Every structure is written in structure tokens, then in C-alpha cells.
Image (spheres, rainbow, N blue to C red):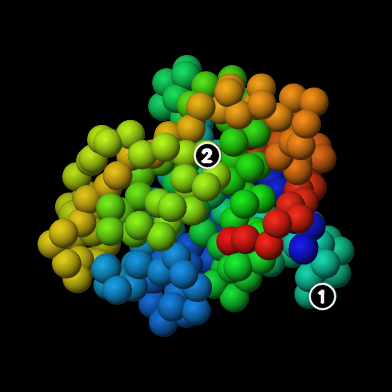
Amino acid sequence: MATLHFRVATADDVALIHPLVESAYRGEESKLGWTTEAHLISGVRIDTAGLLAKVTDPDGAVLIATCPDDSTSQNIPETRPVIACCEVVRRTPQVAYFGMFAVSPRRQGSGIGRQVLASAEDYCLQTWGTEKLEMTVISSRQELIGWYQRRGYEVTGETRPFPFEELAKLNSVPLTDDLRFEVLEKDLTAASAGETGGKGSGISTPIGEVGKGGAAALVAADSTPRV
């Protein structure tokens, strides 16, 4: 199990994050993992302008994960390859949104996804005091919805329309008309209370201590070999 370092992305990281996100969702490389959307949508997932907007959003953060054990890193945090990322956005004082979850297809199935999700939850709790974290998942991705349910998320029964107009702006093409989102959410305060005195999330340094644009490395470890 790899030990990951997490930090909040800056504008300088966009060129590192963009190919990761594309490889996790679209194109032939994405088919090496199980999070691919290549069978549902053709084209890009996000452009660099859209990614920069997320990185610089004052009500959000893009968290990136690197592996200090990577032989190409030379043990310099800023030069380590980005192997996973996610976006969190403060929607209201009580509710945050989790999205743009990407793990390198070649690194999936090794527990990295669990670490990223736990780090995002800790960030929202410690930075914003968020009570709930919500996400949207394409409704046909039942295996992905099941993965989140095993992480404590509940299907709310709410559905939201798929942003076909955003696809058109990126010159991306839906391969099916049956695209819509299921809304999932998790009560972070209940989860945090349940971990008190017991097994925690595996975050050894609070990610909330890294401010927007901070570059301090945070360490996470998860002993369960899951995506």
C-alpha cells in the first residue's frame, strides 16, 4: 500500500492535473481502469480553462495526491507525478460538493481512491465545518454508486439532469441519450463522531491545515487494498 502526500493545487498544477483527469475518464487509456466514461461519452472531460477555474475558485479546492515512493520524484514534492485528484466546493455553510475524482488508471485497485475520498472529507470538515458532502454519479454507473455506498454514502433519490450543453461547448459527444445524475450524500459529522476513539480515516496530518494554495505535504495511509 502506497503512502500518499496530499496538497491543495495551485494554478501551476493545471498542466499536471489535466492529463490525469482525461486519462481517468476518456480515451483508450481510461479503459485500463474501471472509472472510465469512454463508453458513454466521446471527447474531453474538461479543458484547461475549466480546470483553472476550479483550482482558483475561492469557495473550492482541488486536492492532488502524489506518491513519495515514486522513483521519478527524486523526493521533491513539487516534481512528483500527480496520481490522483478531486475537487471539493462549499455550496452552503452546511453542504459541500465532491467531484472531478480521478485516479490514474494504472494505479486503480490499490486503495488510492479510498485515501483521496477520506482526505476530501477531512478537508471539508476541518476547513469549512461542513456537515454533509454530496456528489453526483451517472445513474447507469451502479458499480460506482455501490463503491460510494460502501464508503458510507447514501442514495438520496434525487436525480439531476446531465449538462449536455457543457459537452457541446467542449465538442464532446454523448454516446447515449440516457444520461442523468443520481445524488449521493454523507453525513460527515456522524462519520467523524463514530471514528472518535476508534479507527480514524488514516490521515496522519490534518489536511485542513493546508490553506488555499498551500504546498505543505500531508500523509495518508489506508491498509485496505480497494480503489
Give the position of the C terminus as an image quadrant.
Answer: bottom right
**Residue at the bottom extreme of this rendering:** 28
Residue 135 tag number: none
Kind of residue indicated by mark 1: Ser
Q: In this rendering, would 46 be left or right of 226?
A: left
Q: In this rendering, would 76 be left or right of 157?
A: right
Viewer-closest of 112 and 80 = 112
Residue 152 tag number: 2
Q: Quadrant of residue 4?
A: bottom right
CB atoms of marks 2 and 1 within 8 Å? no
Residue 65 visible in the current orientation: yes
Say if 224 sits above or below 201 in the image. Answer: below
Residue at image location 27% in from the left, 36% down from the top: 157
In the picture of the structure, the residue carrying the numbered disc 1 is 71
Pointer 2 or 1: first along the chain: 1
Number of dots carrying numbers: 2
Q: How crowded is the residue under tag 1: few (<14 C-alpha within 10 Å), some, or many (20+)?
A: few
Residue at image location 36% in from the left, 39% down from the top: 155
Residue 42 is situated, as x and y percent measured from the top left of the image, at: 27, 72
Q: How crowded is the residue under tag 2: few (<14 C-alpha within 10 Å), some, or many (20+)?
A: some
Residue 2 is situated, as x and y percent measured from the top left of the image, at: 77, 63
Say if 224 sits above or below 152 in the image. Answer: below
Residue 218 is situated, as x and y percent measured from the top left of the image, at: 77, 44
Q: CA distance from mark 2 to mark 1?
A: 34 Å
**Residue at the right extreme of this rendering:** 75
Residue at image location 80% in from the left, 26% down from the top: 197
Q: Quadrant of residue 126?
A: top right
Residue 184 is situated, as x and y percent measured from the top left of the image, at: 39, 39
**Residue at the top extreme of this rendering:** 93
